[in-house]
Amino acid sequence: MTARTEISAILRDPAALAGKTLRADGWVKSARNSGQVGFIDLNDGSCFASLQVLLLSESLPNYADVLKLGTGSSVSVTGVLTPSPGGGQLYELRAEAVSVYAASPPDYPLQKKRHSLEFLRGLPHLRARANVFAAVFRIRSLLTFAVHRFFQERGFVCAHTPVITTNDSEGAGEMFRVTTLDPGRVPLNADGGADFGADFFGREASLTVSGQLEAEALAHAFGKVYTFGPAFRAENSNTARHAAEFWMVEPEIAFADLADGMALAEDLVKFLARDVLTSAAAEIAFLDRFAANGLVARLESLARADFARLTYTEAVALLEKENAAFRYKARWGADLQTEHERFLTEKIFRGPVFVTDYPREIKAFYMRANDDGQTVAAMDLLVPGIGELVGGSQREERAAVLSARLAELGMPAENYAWYLDLRRYGGTPHTGFGLGFERAVMLMTGMANIRDVLPFPRTAGSAGPRSEDS
Ligand code: 4AD
Ligand code: MG
């Protein structure tokens, strides 16, 4: 039996393989015929493009059966690679034998016609076979690799930080508890609360919301580290930009300030935009044509853009002039709403913009206090179509200031003793940020809903379809 050749290898340099007998295995994207001649578009997932298979009734014994195969059937085709007279492809595989792994019956939900994203969302186990999702999820894979390349080329050490944790690093209380206690028979302590001393870890534990605090520890050994892992947030916000389980890229650098962090974030985002334009050229071109018109031009301008920088105080002054247009009025001291963020990046700056130096009351405990006593050295990167893509800060490296802030917020010092050690033993001015990976994939693909860039999204009220739904 002829050894299998992947379709990507055939299409990469078909002229070199012309005249050879090849075997291609894959799924039928579509089949059509005009009497004695038939065609199959065969896709094996090795690349975005499909291979055209030519079927001739005179030379293919099971010609009629093959043409009855439904979209989605899996087949093995052996034939000779031949120049193709038709338009659309330079070569086609002239079939000499077609065997069937599994036929796909007519109720296969992904027929050749275009389906809505909402319809496909109900079929997470099948939708990666639809062109849009084949493009988006491959781009997600290429972006994953690009993130690692970006940091590895710059000498960063990749750190795997724990998924199970005992600290709430953002202090926002949006954590999923991890427990082996029986919910029907939770042991109680003297004051009637749950006795987590009897739990698996001997104390309360949760899924991490961010690997930052551990990344800070490792940055004080390696100087420059990054994490790239899952984060979990029990935010009950049912928006197109929030998932309960998402991935975050968190670099952390010692001997660096807020401006260094912003420069790194700007370089990273531009690097990713440049990267997909070449590494995912076929997928990006498809999305530009069918799902996100103008994507190529937007990515090209993103790769060249100079990201604007302004302070929160300046941003609020600009937004207050537009308050008539907002549902939530902008005012100093309140967090920026998505409508404010998008107005800044889409209407005022028309491009990516860093907002810095937010009021200390609305930001996490670890951010470095500015001399004004009101603000902290925070930065958010806002981008068109999405709003917040990156959140970061310079960290409070002064042990006394940090201890006072923990006390002020009523956060138990004993839980953060190790974190204070990082300041007591060779502390440094250091800085870092978190890039929401799904939001980056949205930006790079033009997809408008986070549920469409996660292969199996988990959002409030939805931890995957029930078997009766799918
Ligand atoms: O701004 P956030 O909350 O920052 C942190 O977690 C810091 N510890 C990061 C750091 O400094 N190392 O989250 C960072 C980014 C956000 O800008 C956003 O892009 C993304 O993570 N993000 C989410 N993405 C999807 N769904 C959610 N529920 C998200 N919450 C945050
Ligand atoms: Mg944030």
Image: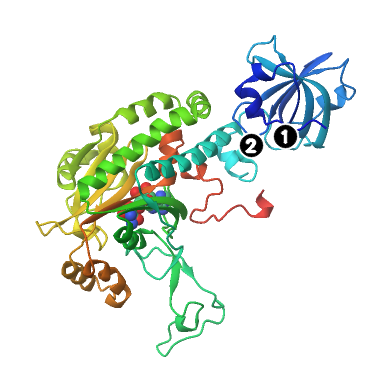
Which mark, by number, is residue 129? Answer: 2
- Type of residue at label 1? Gly
Q: Which residue is labeled 1 in the image?
A: 72
Residue 145 as seen in the image, left or right of residue 464: left
Of callouts 1 and 2, the N-terminal one: 1
Horizontal and vertical percent position of residue 350: 27, 31
Image quadrant holding the N terminus, namely: top right
Task: Count the marks.
Answer: 2
Tag 1 secondary structure: loop
Query: Does the residue at mark 1 contact the one at mark 2 (Cβ under 8 Å)?
Result: yes
As drawn, which residue projects farthest toward the right?
61
Asked whether residue 374 is in view, the answer is yes
Which residue is depicted at the point 33% across and 46% down? 390
Horizontal and vertical percent position of residue 60: 87, 21
In the image, residue 55 sits, relative to residue 329, either above or below, namely above
As drawn, which residue projects farthest toward the bottom?
190
As drawn, which residue projects farthest toward the left?
372
In the image, residue 60 sits, relative to residue 420, either above or below, namely above
In the image, residue 320 sits, relative to residue 39, either above or below, namely below
Horizontal and vertical percent position of residue 272: 40, 36
- Type of residue at label 2? Arg
Mark 2 neighbour density, 10 Å: few (under 14) some (14–19) many (20 or more):
some
Tag 2 secondary structure: helix
Which residue is depicted at the point 42% across and 46% down? 437
Q: Quadrant of residue 314?
A: top left
